[in-house]
Image (cartoon, rainbow, N blue to C red):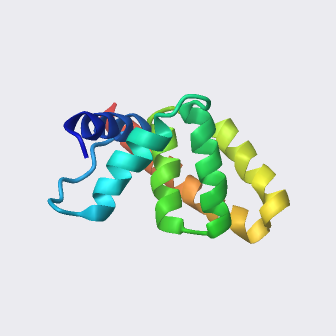
Amino acid sequence: MSDERRAKGLEWFDKVMGFRPPVIPDDPFLDATVDHLFAGVWARPGLGVKERRIATLVVLMQLGNEQTLRLHFGAAMKQKQLTDTEIDELILHVAHYAGWPVAAISSQIVRALRAERDKAAKASG
């Protein structure tokens, strides 16, 4: 991939996730994530970061992938892409379409992330 595409992907990765991805030489999955997913999909016009974040969270909730849900809920909170109220409403809305167990997992993840956030805020002053 071109250096320009890589730079765009890294910029969008940081914008969306709130951190730079690890540097792993010759990793085709990481290359595709940065060069295609972030430079090509997240950076497309038509939907903003918030709308894409909501779509991503809904899919991840349905899949029940706790590790990736934690990553994306955490990024949404850190990057202030969704408010606490918006996250709560999203989980409640998805519960009615995807089921209570799916929403319960997301709710537990979000509660833990908020506790970590609040503890860090309290510790820093």
Residue beneath the point at 23% across and 40% down: 2
Along the line of sight, which residue is nearer the eye, 31 or 57?
A: 31
Where residue 107 sits, quadrant-wise, is bottom right
- Residue drawn at 18 percent across, 59 percent down: 24
Residue 63 vertical placement versus 119 (above, below):
below
Q: Is residue 39 left or right of residue 100?
A: left
In the image, taking residue 81 as reference, residue 98 lies left or right, namely right
Q: Is residue 100 visible?
A: yes
Location of the C terminus (image quadrant): top left
Image point 33% across, 46% down: which residue? 35
Task: Pinpoint residue 8: horizontal percent, then vertical percent.
Answer: 32, 34
Q: Position of residue 11 (x, y in %)?
A: 32, 34
- 9 horizontally vs 87: left or right: left
Farthest residue to the left: give it.
25
Q: Nearer the viewer, residue 99 or 12?
A: 12
Residue located farthest toward the right when viewing the structure as drawn = 96
Taking depth in this image into account, of 16 and 119 the one nearest to the observer is 16
Q: Residue at x 25, y 47 (%)?
A: 1
From where the camera sits, is residue 118 visible? Answer: no
Image height of 51 relative to 94, above or below: above
Q: Position of residue 47 (x, y in %)?
A: 61, 32
Kindly indicate the quadrant of the structure image that contains residue 3. top left
Expressed as whole percent of the image width and height from the top left, the position of residue 52 reads 59, 40
